[in-house]
Image (spheres, rainbow, N blue to C red):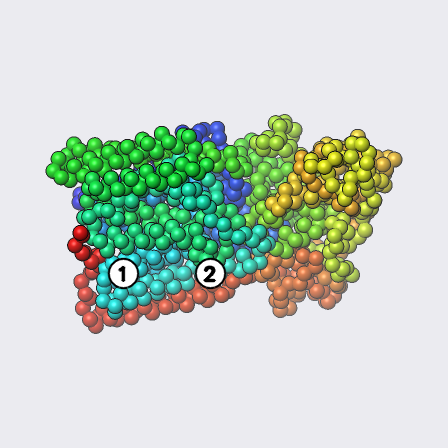
Amino acid sequence: MQFRPRRAAALLAAAVTITAFCAADALARSYPFGPRTRSVNDLGNQYVPFHAHLWDLLHGRADGGLLVNWQSGYGSSFLPDLGTYLGSPFALLVAVFPRDEIDLAVYVVTVLKTASAAAAMACLLLTLRPGRWWAAGLLGTSYALCGWSVADASYNPMWLDGLIALPLLCLVGEWALAGRRRFLGVLVVALAWTANFYTAYMATLGAGLVLLLRLVLADLPRRRALAAAGRAALTVVLGVGLAAPLVTVIYFGTKHAYPGRVRQFAPVASEDVLARLLPATYGFGSPAVYVGVTALLLALALPFHRAVPARVRTGWTLLVLAVTLSMQWAPTHLVWHAFATPQGSPYRQAFVLCGLLVIAAWYALSYGPPDRRALAAAAGLLALITLAASRSDLVRPFAWPVLLLATAGALGGLALLGRADAGQRSRLAGLAVVLLLGGQLGETAATSAVATRLRLAHLDDYAPWGQRQQRQTDAVAGADGWPRYRTDPGREQTVGNDPLLVGGQGAQYYSSLTSDVLSRTLTALGDGWTSRGRSVQSLDNAVTDVVFSVGARVHSPPDPHQKHVAQDSAPVTVTRQDVPPLVTVRTAPDRAPFGPSPYRNQELLLGSRVYTVPRLAVHGDTGKPARGGRVGSGNAVTRPTITARCPAGTQVYLWAPHYSGTARQHGAGTDARFRFEYPRNRAAMAPLGPAPANGRLRIELTPDRPGRIPGGAIGCLDTARLRTAAARLKATAATEVTVSDGTLRAQLPPGSRGIAVVAAPRIAGWRCATGGGRERPAGEYHGLIAVPLDGNSTSLTCTFHPPGLRLGTAVGGASLLTLALLGALTAVRRRRVPAPSTTTPPRERVTTAR
């Protein structure tokens, strides 16, 4: 069998990457090799639940389809989420795992993506310039397990598609230079932008810079250079055009999403940037540009490596420096991030710099190992970097032994490799390979393990699938009655997307694309949220359950995995309520706008008065009134109480969106938890049990930070009135409702007038028709879908059309047609003119090194 260097390099890179990745998790005792969870932050809250929902879709068990996710947010657009979180072909692999092993499925997908990035980079390096296949594999691993990958992308698995895309798009640039594989190049671009358009955008910018440098170094005639650049630009345009049906849907989804916090970019200190070049360092808000000591030394040696042509040394050194500086300058920072500073880590483009460092290292090695002079200069620069970085808090004591051992191994391996090239080959070369690969494995595993441990201490974390989730799933399945009514998985959430993880159809929903109308509507009704409004929570309230047709509600004990909650063996229970169907008829709708009181807003949607909102007083331990309702540490009110009067037997609710701590009605109920932290979290309304027979309320508060109790915080719900209101709505509501993906149909009683209200948020894209009439954009009734009725129609049909899908389909069709025409023209030209011999990408012009 013929030896193929690229294949061997790709396999070596993938194998070393998988070994180092898994060894790091074993060293950190992280899932699946230890008791520590790896589901931190959005991995547990978003990505694992979305992959679970994909599993349900692929197995035909989900409520909804590709257009509408009926499980989250009372009905949300799913295509934008699919393109943002699940567009990668690797995501489909979750289907082969058991449903209760969804955490393992996401882990395997993460490992395979990282290994694929290593293999892609190894192939790119050997395409750019011939060299040692094992060295290409080593540097491929350096790229795939760069600091950005192990510190940031390992728990944001959709970003790893950008890690794969960068070397693949650079390969597309090489094909454009050579005038080869034009159609394959278009497909690669389309796949990259479909998998994750956000990081694909950054990878495209990075690949464009590489191509421009390659054109300059090749010193081609202007006409050939322009032709190559034109081919590359056309390839990108057509590829992005093919991905447009998904890209445009995501774009319009962000336009209709609840606005996040607008941040101003502030560059980190230079010593922090330099510190992140070193192994075993970690910092959430700094650029993770570690690529391994071997790759770093080679990149530092490049300017001094006399065997490398001067133009090549200068060009790649300047490109690396320019991209590094662009990360620290606000205007170019915005360009890298599509003109919007991220709400999380502001250095999401760092993988591009890591890729450039690795390519620069390859150029230094492919011309032969650096000589003593170049290695000495590189070691000196590394010493200066280390000295400057030592002032950073990101360099912790355990980083020094890792750095020293890695540096010794890298310098020793490169020196031995140089001697082997000088004539003493076999044993020295083998020892050099062992030193370099062993050092790479050790320092990368240590760096990844450090990132895993420190990330777990820095971010929120969530337990993998276990007994709690299984009990919730069983409870939801036993109560499910969709679409006759909704089953809410409960206020006591496990993760931010419980309905996707354990089933049911609730208000809870966490996405970067959470709609503005959903978040604002639920907030007006007294709901709480985290992530600055993009993670809305379940609202345990009898009135909103009637409005949104929640006929069953699951109640779980607090999650024992969370640090502030003790182990609780209480059972998972289900409460039921007789509620109207998803479609109700309002003969005389109240169009008054929402006001400041969530109790009055709920009554507007319900169409009946069911609350008493009494006057209240907030007092401290001494009995003195709390000025402005302020409670919590930082003032004199340390153990405050609220007093008020409610009609006997009514259900007491407390609405305190700016309060953090617990509340308990004296003599009744259990502690209700409120969580407020400006600007991230807003506390949800909570039930406190029935009012006592004398009607006098005393609510005891235990704040854990400064907060405020607003006027009108207490609502006394008359449950008898609520049952009457629910029965009235049910009597005139739809007699039958069917739901299938993006279509909802309802049969209405004869003579229905006023408006039909669908218990779903009026997100952009809904169109409705009555009888056999024409579809029109749906109206809105206090944030819900509303359709006017004329008394003649007895049927209602609403269909969802994702905003941007029609435009994206048109662009995609035009791109496909253009691609077909180009293919036909190419075929005709080949018949008329003999095909030229296959060319290879032009090499850099060689100049004599001085």
Residue 316 circle label:
none
Marks counted in the figure total 2
Q: Is residue 784 above or below residue 441?
A: below
Task: Kindly tell me whether residue 595 is visible in this rendering.
Answer: yes
Residue at 23% from the left image edge and 38% from the top image edge: 414
Residue position for label 2: 245
**Spatial separation of the CA atoms under disc 1 and disc 2:** 32 Å
Residue 302 location (% of width, % of height) = 26, 47
Residue at disc 2, secondary structure: helix
In the image, what residue type sits under mark 1? Leu
Which numbered disc flags the more N-terminal residue, 1 or 2? Answer: 1
Residue 591 location (% of width, % of height) = 75, 61
Depth order, front residue of 252/477: 252
Depth order, front residue of 395/645: 395
Residue 634 location (% of width, % of height) = 69, 37
Residue 236 location (% of width, % of height) = 37, 61
Q: Which quadrant would the N terminus be assigned to in this image? A: top left
Q: Nearer the viewer, mark 1 or mark 2?
A: 1
Residue position for label 1: 215
In-image side of 68 versus 312 (left or right) = right
